[in-house]
Amino acid sequence: MTTPEHDDYTPADLTPANESEIEAERARMFTLGFWKSLLAGREGLGDTFWAGNYLAALFFVPVYVLLIAIPPLYGLIPVVFALFGIYLLFVARAVWLAKPKGDAGKGWKIAGVIWTLMNAAMSLAYTPFTGGS
């Protein structure tokens, strides 16, 4: 029996005794180095999919809300939609390149790429319809 692979950032033992290591690894997700590594596909498949799709949305969604709340900035809404869609295309590439940890097979990788591409397509398709005046 082989032990599952672990990268340099994820502790092998995730018990509360290693809570400080877990917190440090999660804090790393808010650094520029993490995002460069993520978009290059060097993070694990799970981190790449979840952080790439949904942690980034924690930035983009408040930007959308702010732009909607300030009428003179309505013209920037399509720009943000387009940027998010393009960003998601890069995330789809990164999900494809990312190495799954443990026993995760190609099925999860393919599902992650398809899901991310669907989100990118939705964002890019809505772009022309998001500009208000």
Image: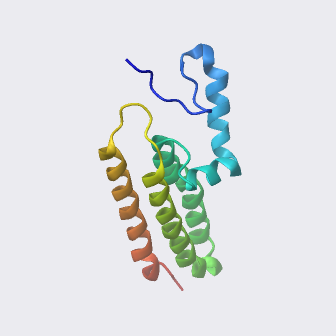
Residue drawn at (40%, 58%) of the image: 116
Residue drawn at (45%, 26%) of the image: 4
On the image, the x and y values in percent for residue 75 come to: 58, 82
On the image, the x and y values in percent for residue 81 come to: 51, 71
- On screen, residue 92 versus residue 15, left or right, reads left
Q: Is residue 90 above or below residue 26?
A: below
- Image quadrant holding the C terminus, namely bottom right
Considering every residue shown, the one lying at the far front of the view is 1
- Image quadrant holding the N terminus, namely top left
- Number of numbered labels in the structure image: 0
Name which quarter of the figure residue 21 lies in. Answer: top right
Q: Is residue 68 above or below residue 15?
A: below
Q: Nearer the viewer, residue 30 or 130?
A: 30
On the image, the x and y values in percent for residue 6 come to: 53, 30
Residue drawn at (57%, 50%) of the image: 38
Q: Is residue 3 above or below residue 40?
A: above
Q: Nearer the viewer, residue 18 or 65?
A: 18
